[in-house]
Amino acid sequence: MFNYTAQPESNLEFVEIAPASELPNGGRLFVDVGEKPIVIFNIAGGFFAIGDICTHDEGPLGDGVIEDHHIICPRHGAEFDVRNGKAISMPAAVDIPAYPVQIRDGKIFIGMPKE
Ligand code: FES
């Protein structure tokens, strides 16, 4: 329900985050956009951004182990797809936000919903 990667770009505002060189392959970058904690991943050259709060118990999620395109919550093991925010396994039943990432002129931009 918070899969902003599926939204038309006209509903989004792209916010500049950092030079893409700060997020090499296999890396992760933690940022706050407005009030929202977000973690951005570079997985094999693909960039993915999700909300950094687990929907199970609101713990931080971004330090979890990545397997393929899934992240495993470090607290109780819920699993989410970083491409679309989908909750894949219990104890989380609610999706997390996923935001589109674009690289423009060597910089990372995230598409945030317009207020
Ligand atoms: S807080 Fe993430 S699984 Fe419990």
Image (cartoon, rainbow, N blue to C red):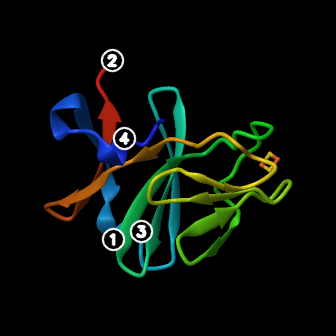
Q: Nearer the viewer, residue 73 or 27?
A: 73
Disc 2 residue type?
A: Glu
* Dot 3 alpha-carbon crowd within 10 angstroms: few under 14, some 14 to 19, many 20 or more: some
**Disc number placed over residue 115 in the picture, else none:** 2
Going from the N terminus, do you reach mark 2 or mark 4 first? 4
Spatial separation of the CA atoms under disc 1 and disc 2: 29 Å
Disc 3 residue type?
A: Leu
Spatial separation of the CA atoms under disc 3 and disc 2: 27 Å
Going from the N terminus, do you reach mark 4 or mark 1 first? 4
The kind of secondary structure element at disc 4 is: helix
* Residue tagged 3: 23
**Quadrant of the image for the C terminus?**
top left
Check the image and report above or below for 14 versus 80.
above
Going from the N terminus, do you reach mark 1 or mark 2 first? 1
Q: Is mark 2 within 8 Å of ligand 1?
A: no
Marks 1/2 in contact by CB < 8 Å: the verdict is: no
Q: Nearer the viewer, mark 2 or mark 4?
A: 4
Spatial separation of the CA atoms under disc 3 and disc 4: 21 Å
* Residue tagged 4: 4
Q: Residue at x 76, y 56 (%)?
A: 78
**Disc number placed over residue 86 in the picture, else none:** none
Q: Is mark 3 within 8 Å of ligand 1?
A: no
* Residue tagged 1: 21
Answer left or right for 89 relative to 115.
Answer: right
The kind of secondary structure element at disc 1 is: helix
Answer left or right for 76 relative to 5.
Answer: right
- The part of the image, by quadrant, that contains residue 65 is bottom right
